[in-house]
Amino acid sequence: MAGWSCLVTGAGGFLGQRIIRLLVEERELQEIRALDKAFRPELQEEFSKLQSQSKLTLLEGDILDEQFMKRACQGTSAVIHAASVIDVFNAIPRETIMDVNVKGTQILLEACAQASVPIFIYTSTIEVAGPNSYREVIRDASEDQPLESTWSAPYPHSKKLAEEAVLAANGWALRNGGILSTCALRPMYIYGEGSPFLRGFVDQALRNHGTLPHNSKLSVVNPVYVGNAAWAHVLALRALRDPERAASVGGQFYYIADDTPPQSYDQLNYALGREWGFHLDARRGLPVLLQYWLGFLLEMVSLLLRPVCRYRPPFNRHTVTLLNSVFTFSYKKAQRDLGYKPLFSWEQAQQNTAAWIGALVKRHREAGRAKAR
Ligand SMILES: NC(=O)c1ccc[n+]([C@@H]2O[C@H](COP(=O)([O-])OP(=O)(O)OC[C@H]3O[C@@H](n4cnc5c(N)ncnc54)[C@H](O)[C@@H]3O)[C@@H](O)[C@H]2O)c1
């Protein structure tokens, strides 16, 4: 398949950008279409510098726009679908999340069938597998274990439905008589330079004399560095383009982790930020059981207030569970089928991320000094 092209949705996002940066290095890739709702001017400039290596086209638009998606898919050989609305804290209306994550994925699958795009890779999430209870310990789990999120919270629910739709589309007949091959990648929590979650924690700590929140002491997770999560997408693409491997990869899902040591979310933030004087909040938090039932109470308050106003609780049962569970996964299946091996070690990932946090701290201090003048 010499001279092929790839469409990446969500290409302006945290992960999508890294996928684009790796794709430009792929030999034989003639065109990359980077699609997002909007691209920041700095990113546009950065992408324009990549243009010399392969043709990179930016497409700004909504994945819910069927005509736009049909045009975006026309003449492309593969799709990496990373666009999504991520919302753990119920900040975004449920309908928006369901629309973008589920309907958007269905529109894209249909557009691929119409335009005879033979490869579709979906960026799913570990959250489609759970955790469902903070009391259940899941360590080093693999794809053979039947794990499925039972939460009706819009983010995990929508990602689960979208993943199901993608895997069910494996084997679809394409308009040109070809066959669609699909697979889904389920990255762990992703960290690294540009992470919107990490930026939130850093901003919070900067406002709070360097104190990082310490509300997920009990969690044990194995997060993945963004460069490694992006690399897994490139390898999935190579596997589905390889006629010998496509049959075994098509219709499969893969957990994507790396060699980041299992730790709590709090410990991860501390490991990444301690160089800049950040420390964890030393205060004792509420017992998890109490947090859980308080979360339930707050959900009820939000429900009762719905006819009058929109109240967004600071936490709920789902977030308490996410932040307090032992939930770690192995990447052996991705290693076996996709040849996945992390590109970055934990030390490199930590160094890169800490350097980015350092730049945020510096910018914050400079802004403070300018204000004081
Ligand atoms: N960040 C994590 O920890 C994590 C973990 C596991 C899986 N994922 C998955 O990885 C993918 C990328 O996540 P991310 O962390 O880069 O998030 P992100 O928010 O940085 O990127 C998502 C991108 O999708 C775009 N988008 C949203 N709605 C759109 C629409 N209607 N039309 C076009 N573009 C739209 C956004 O503009 C954004 O640039 C998502 O599918 C997410 O579910 C993320």
Image (spheres, rainbow, N blue to C red):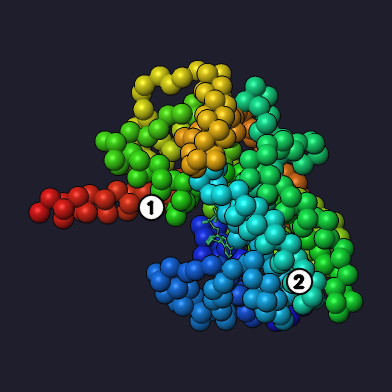
Query: Distance of mark 1 from mark 2, alpha carbons?
Result: 37 Å
Residue 64: which quarter of the image?
bottom right
Residue 242: which quarter of the image?
bottom right
Q: Is residue 330 left or right of residue 294?
A: right
Counting other residues with Cα less than 10 Å from the Cα at mark 2, is it few (<14), some (14-19), or many (20 or more)? many
* Image height of 94 relative to 106, above or below: above
Residue found 75% across the figure and 36% down from its top: 147
Cβ of mark 1 under 8 Å from ligand 1: the answer is no
Report the quarter where the C terminus lies: bottom left
Q: Is residue 335 visible from the viewing direction of this image?
A: no
Quadrant for ligand 1 reads bottom right
Q: Is residue 52 visible from the viewing direction of this image?
A: yes
Query: At which x and y percent is residue 35?
Result: 58, 70
Query: At which x and y percent is residue 285?
Result: 43, 21
Asked which secondary structure carries label 1, the reply is helix
Residue found 71% across the figure and 67% down from its top: 108
Say whether disc 1 or disc 2 marks the residue closer to the N-terminus.
Answer: 2
* Image height of 146 relative to 167, above or below: above
Residue ID for mark 1: 356
- Amino acid type at circle 1 is Trp
Residue found 68% across the figure and 44% down from its top: 157
Residue ID for mark 2: 112
- Amino acid type at circle 2 is Cys
Cβ of mark 2 under 8 Å from ligand 1: the answer is no
